[in-house]
Amino acid sequence: MSRKGGLIFIFCSFILSCAILPAGRKLDPDHKEFLSKVRYIITSQERKTFLNLPPSERQAFVEEFWKKRDQDPDTDVNEYREEYYRRIDTANRLFKEGGHSGWLQDRGRIYILLGPPEQRETYPRGYGFYDPPMEIWHYGFYKLIFVDFHWNGNFELQPQSARMLAEINVAQMQLRPELRSEKALSDFSLDVKKTSERELILLISIPYKDIWFSVEGEEFKTTLEVSVEVYDASDKMVREETKSFPLSLDQKELEGQKSKDYLIEILVQLDPGKYRAAVTLKNLTEKTRVRKNIELIV
């Protein structure tokens, strides 16, 4: 897929793109590689969520990460993911010099984020007499300048060009891939209340103002779906259930609830012990999905 075809990787985490894993995080090789490779497109909140997940849930996160970036979910191929990894491979092939893998260099990073430039000018002996090697990449009316200050093949993006990236993103915003937002459910809270020796109630609270509705006539409607998975101390699933909660309000009712929370209670019965509950909340109107964990002691 070409850059003009509509796949532009937005400069959402450029400044933090070289962040490394916090000390003490235990990731298996596959998930460590995933987190490294998506450094240019993963949001800070997604990264934090991924690192805090138990190992058994990380693969589900990876699948959801790519799914919500898929431009055409009805096809078997995730074009966004395919193009992203294709650009990494191309960057490694194009930018071999410099002492680092091509995709980790400035030119590789920009190639991955913005795609191939419309025009690429190379000056291996410098733009002027005694100048270091330089490249100029053109994206529409904008140009990005890379300079090999140390004559070692490592072309660095000039600071003024880095600042220009924000303008490029604004100019190309209409081409950005749709990313289904999780904002509608990002603020739900999860708590637990013990009601008897072996019985607990999971309390899920969602601000009405954060719930997305569809409009049907004079009614605002949606359905919230709650899935609960309970794991024992060995991380083995011992309980699983899914429930749906349809909501329907008129405009006056919705305005009266906007400062309040919608409360969902899920009854859980367990044998004595220590558990972890993973609660997934879906808004079927906007097709968002948010997952949280809580410790249970019976």
Image (cartoon, rainbow, N blue to C red):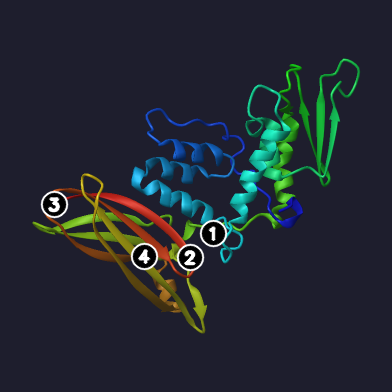
The CA span between labels 1 and 3 is: 37 Å
**Amino acid type, mark 1:** Arg
Label 2: which residue?
287
148 vs 120: above or below:
above
SS for dot 4? loop
SS for dot 1? loop
Residue 260: image tag: 4
Q: Nearer the viewer, mark 4 or mark 2?
A: 2
Q: Nearer the viewer, mark 4 or mark 3?
A: 3
Pointer 1 local density, CA inside 10 Å: few below 14, some 14–19, many at least 20: some
Residue reaching furthest to the left:
197
- Whichever of callouts 1 and 2 sits on the residue coming sooner in the sequence is 1
Label 1: which residue?
180
Instruction: Decide if residue 214 is on the left or right side of residue 238.
Output: right
Check whether the beta carbons of the residues at disc 1 and disc 2 lie within 8 A of each other.
yes
Label 3: which residue?
298
The CA span between labels 1 and 2 is: 8 Å
Q: Nearer the viewer, mark 4 or mark 1?
A: 1
**Amino acid type, mark 3:** Val
- Whichever of callouts 4 and 1 sits on the residue coming sooner in the sequence is 1
The CA span between labels 3 and 2 is: 34 Å
